[in-house]
Amino acid sequence: FAPNGKSLAYSAAQDGNSDIYQIELDSRSVKQLTSHNSADLSPSWSPDGRHLAFTSDRGGRPQIYIMDADGLNARRLTFDGDYNAAPAWSPKGDW
């Protein structure tokens, strides 16, 4: 759930590919946030609601990525290790 409690980010598979979506709880409006030929999973809201961290294998092996809450500006955060998954934010959002 987003920090404001008004939306939920989740991953769902369509066409054999998992992407991240956001649903507005009041209106039930769904927005697709990622569209990549890879598995994008485990979205986690930043405490301020401005970003989502998630796991993706778009680089070949599962790594942690971050993007703006609107799905823009996705960038890879982890580069070491073969399997980095299930991101979680620190309470202040600095880690």
Image (cartoon, helix red, strand yellow):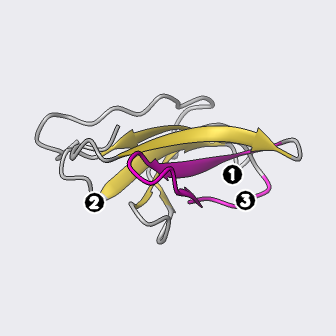
* Of callouts 3 and 2, the N-terminal one: 3
Which of the pair 71/95 is nearer the observer?
71
Q: Distance between the residues labelled 1 and 3?
A: 11 Å
The residue at which mark 1 appears reads as: 59
* Of callouts 2 and 1, the N-terminal one: 2
Q: Give the range drawn in magenta.
A: 17-37
Classify 42 as above or below 37: above
At a point 26% along the width and 53% down the height, the residue shown is 49
The reply to whether discs 1 and 3 touch (Cβ–Cβ < 8 Å) is no
At a point 21% along the width and 47% down the height, the residue shown is 4
- The answer to whether any part of residue 10 appears in the image is yes
The reply to whether discs 3 and 2 touch (Cβ–Cβ < 8 Å) is no
Kindly state the secondary structure of the residue where label 2 is placed: loop
Q: Distance between the residues labelled 3 and 2?
A: 21 Å
Q: Which amino acid does label 2 sit on?
A: Arg
Which of the pair 74/43 is nearer the observer?
43
